[in-house]
Amino acid sequence: MPAFRPSFRCFFRHPRTVLAMALLGLAVTAGAAQAQSTDVDEIVARANQAAYYAGDDGRSEARMRIVDGSGREQVRQFTLLRRDVDDGRQRYLVAFSRPADVRGTVFLVHKNPGAADDRWLYLPGLDLVRRIAPGDKRTSFVGSHVFYEDVSGRHLEDDRHTLVETTDAHYVVKSEPKDPGSVEFAAFTTWIDRDTWLPVRSEYARADGRVYRRMEVLEVREIDGYPTGTRMRMEDLDSGGHTEIEFRFSAYDLGIPDAVFTERSLRNPPRQWLERQ
Amino acid sequence: MGETIARLSMRRPRWVFLAVLALVVGLGALIPRIAIDTDPENMLAADQADRVYDARTDARFDLYDTLVVGLVSDRDEVGIYTPEALADLHALTRRIQAIDGVVAEEVMSLATVDNVEQVAPGTISFDWLMDAPPQTADEAAALREAVERLPMFLGSLVSEDGRAAGIFVPIEDKNASHRIAAEIEAAVAELGIAESVHITGQPVAQDTFGVQMFEQMAISAPLAGLLIFAVMVYFFRSVPVVVAPMLLAMVTVIATMGLLIGLGYTVHIMSSMIPIFLMPIAVVDSVHVMSDFSERWRAGGDPREVMARVIQELHKPIIFTSLTTSVGFGSLLLSPIPPVQVFGAFVACGVLLAMVLTLTFLPAYVAALPGRTLDRMAERVHGASARGGEGGRLARLVAATGRLATRRGRALLALFLLLLGVAVYGITQIQINDNPTRWFKAGHEIRIADRVLNEHFAGTYEAYLVVEQRAGGDLAALLAERVEPLLAEARAAGVALGDDWASLLAQSRGEDIQATLDNLMFAIDDHLFEVGATEAEWWERLLTATEAVRSEALTFQQPEVLRYLADLQQYLEEGGYVGKANSLADLVRTVNRELVSGEAADFRIPDSAAGVAQTILSYQSSHRPGDLWHFVADDYRSANVWLQLPSGDNQDMQRVLDAVDAYVDATPLPAGLALEWAGSTYINLVWQGEMVTGMLLALLSAFAVVLVMMVALFRSLWLGILAMLPLTLTVSLIYGVMGLVGKDYDMPVAVLSALSLGLSVDFAIHFIQRLREAVAEAGGDWRDGMARVFAEPARAIVRNAIVIAIGFLPLLVAPLVPYVTVGIFLASIMAVSAVVTLLMLPAVVATWPDRFFAVPARPRPGAPTDTRKEV
């Protein structure tokens, strides 16, 4: 069954979802009357749509500040391109522009719901294109507190979801992994905004119930008609570190061609799409 | 003066007893506030440069005090690589991570680290090395193959022979290490782990030492007291009388420790020995007093009168021996080691307190005893002498010694000269070395764990070689230097950017210059979209200049700098100076190898700084990106080479330092780089070094002060020098023997040097002072005087030597080596200095009598012949 996965990428919303919801007779214009739902699968599916599938494609520039438990700060700047294919499949391209010494480093993902994602990495300094083995995706994304899996989204079907509570503002959903051995958490709880369907907070807990990791959307803006998380924060409560990401210059439905998301374009970054218009 | 005080005390015994009681209760009440401190780091003052640097290094590289847990398998072939053993390792690691006080996310074992691997051509994998224990022997073998490709872990997390696996357990507070070690042991028992498990690491050794030290304080001091009591009962044949010096010793110990604790000092390894030191020293004077008193007491006498005469005769040697002993201990204040200073100061105080009590409490107590008790004591003591018991045998032996020394003076002096020669040779052979792990006896479990784990692993002792970029640190100035010409050029071209630049720079101000530059780049980047095309061109140039300043400063992304580290490490490893060295160079080379081909040929530093940076970025895409910061600071201007040493001996650490110096001399560091040292093994070396020089200074100054005191006491240069002779030979002999038998000059030995001087001069003081009085009584005939001294006074000296030597004996069975050392050392000092004093002084006097005593015995005008009633 489809399930939901929160993520730091909260800025895309799929128009087809809007259409689908309209057909169901629900009030769905962004920020309109509050949604009413008690079906957890529907809730997580819509949240997933809101978080990862806004528009047919999208572009955003991200700035990341990584602060570790000892106060060390690192920055990363990258442009993120996304295109939806079909059946929930997606392509992501992440191209780094800062720090200068990692400029041109590119990360490509072909997201395949129901199967393993394909991932590639290009390192210009070593002139190497490498496929990343479909192993653990819950490793750090370039040293931040965000995981690779957070970038393109955890597959909905990897967890069992329960609606814990419906508050005035949020659906509170608890998700438990179907394969507990594959992840470091025992469960995570997500607060889904009833206006925008965006997951605005997620808390990951260990078996003893202790929360050790927390994602929060700090700012939501409506862009091209899609509520979009433009600032988010991921905290590691064990080490006391956190990563804050700001998404800027977001835009949707740009008509980014499929060719941008191929292995070939790793070495020849699609400037036209990476540079600000 | 002493006599006046004694008389006063005997007249008002109640006041004396009340005062003593108040002292004990008042200061003793402070003892429960005791705080134990076993951290050898505290051997250095908190602001000592190396210690400050070490703390900064820990903070900069997120380094923790670490326990090392080792699982050792007895299976020869597969060693630890079996599903069962790995399951044990996995389970134990998880249990350890859950222990309170353990920095869970920093625990290192096969079960917590990542593997980067080219799993298929062109495909790399970042994954846990052992997220779950292997289920089959084949999987275990595959794990072995993976581990043996990871130089960062081989030799640390698994021994190269595959027999042992390690868990590195970083802890938040090293004072909790004994408890954490105990919890680990409990977890091992509960899990039923089949492999033998050892726990080591300097924090455990230190904290365990603290716990056992406390136990020793509770055992050794009372035991010493009991033995001293027994010996004195044997000598003086009266329990009620002997209770006096025992009470005196206990009062001294309680008051001194109470004062120390009450003043807020922690009880360190050194100060824990204060009771052991004070107990015998406090009774020394009492033994002289009681020895003299028992000789003089006759049935029906007036105890006050007899005691007054005893004190009149003895107050001077008592005061002077106490002063010299205080000076010996007090000289420790000159050492730069704070716990040693505290130890010296408080023992010195205790000695002075004991002196005051000997002149007040002891007379008051003895005088308050019923006459019958004293009669019985005197009867038994005299009876024993008469029957030829201890007293008689001792008396005959002592008298014979005196005759021998007087007759065979020259021969004895030649013998002493010879001994001194041997001692000096022995001293030149002394090895200066220490290792806190060796403070435990060889059979102690900590020593066993240390031995076993260091046999298998690259080393459980850590030192950090920190390489720092010292040049071009002022990035703000560099930025200004690069930017000014651009701004000027733009101005010349009619584009005024100065104000905008200044405001961007101001709004970008970050925590440090690196953060400022990062912010500035972002700010310029944003600004580019607000300005027109002409201005944008200039801003692009400014952005490029800013980026250049930011990335040029990243010293440890420069390939040649990392190669230097790699070469230095190889030199240290191949030369056998260290078990293993780990640095950013290993991390970069390993990741580079797996990114490129997975082949050994690609275990190298990339050719460009960008290549290095991207290798590091790839490494950060792991489960433990923070491990990077153990090896490099976030400004990439300093790096940490983690050295694993299989031995914590200072000499071995010194060899590493020398090797690095030699290497750097032959192969200069890249421009601007400088080396610094940190880590507990290095810190131990530092305080040991300070100890050696500090103690030498203390020894020399104590010698000078005691000499001056002797000259003042005897009002004669020659008698002063004479008094110094036995102790000079004694101290030389003891250190000479130490050098000859190969006992390392370590912390306890160093501390003993200065104070041994203060103790061993005591016998000479008593001897010479009593000799002068005897010679005067004998009308100036030094031979007659000598014979008198070899009666009661010499017996008192021998009794004293025996009392103290025996008092220190319980230390010999202590499980902690420093206590044993102190016991042996002090017992030897007492024994040797008594023998040397009784042989050497008569020999010297007999050889050059004119130097010391005018013959015939007519007092020359102004000559210091009679000082009995003075002072």
Image: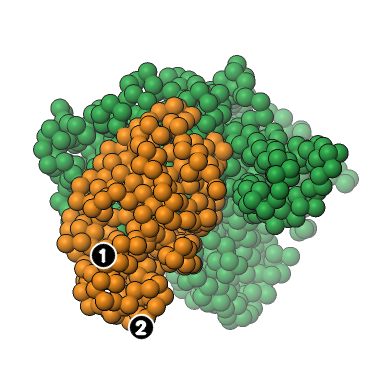
Quarter of the image where the C terminus of chain B is located: bottom right
Question: Could you tell whether B723 is left or right of B235 in the image?
Answer: right
Q: Residue at x 69, y 33 (%)?
A: B471
> Which amino acid type is marked by label 1?
Ala
Residue at x 28%, y 41% (from the top left corner): A118
Q: Give the SS element for disc 2.
A: loop
Residue closer to the observer: B301 or B444 = B444
- Displayed quadrant of residue B152: top left
Q: Residue at x 64, y 39 (%)?
A: B547
* Chain letter of the residue carrying label 2: A
Foreground residue among B76 and B23:
B76
Q: Residue under label 2, please give it.
A: A168
Q: Colour of chain B?
A: green
Which residue is at the front of the view, B90 or B842? B90
Residue B746 in the image, given as x and y percentages of width and height:
51, 38
Q: Which residue is mark 1?
A: A45
Of labels 1 and 2, the one closer to you? 1
Q: Position of residue B638 (x, y in %)?
A: 58, 38
- The reply to the same-chain question for discs 1 and 2 is yes
Describe residue B270's horizontal placement relative to residue B511 as left or right.
Answer: left
The percent coordinates of residue B418 (x first, y second) are 58, 22
**Mark 2 belongs to which amino acid?**
Asp
Expressed as whole percent of the image width and height from the top left, the position of residue A92 reads 37, 46
Q: Residue furthest left?
A: B136
Residue B339 in the image: above or below residue B707: below
The chain that hosts pointer 1 is A
CA separation in Å, label 1 and label 2: 20 Å
- What colour do you see for chain A? orange
Quadrant where the N terminus of chain B is found in the figure: bottom right
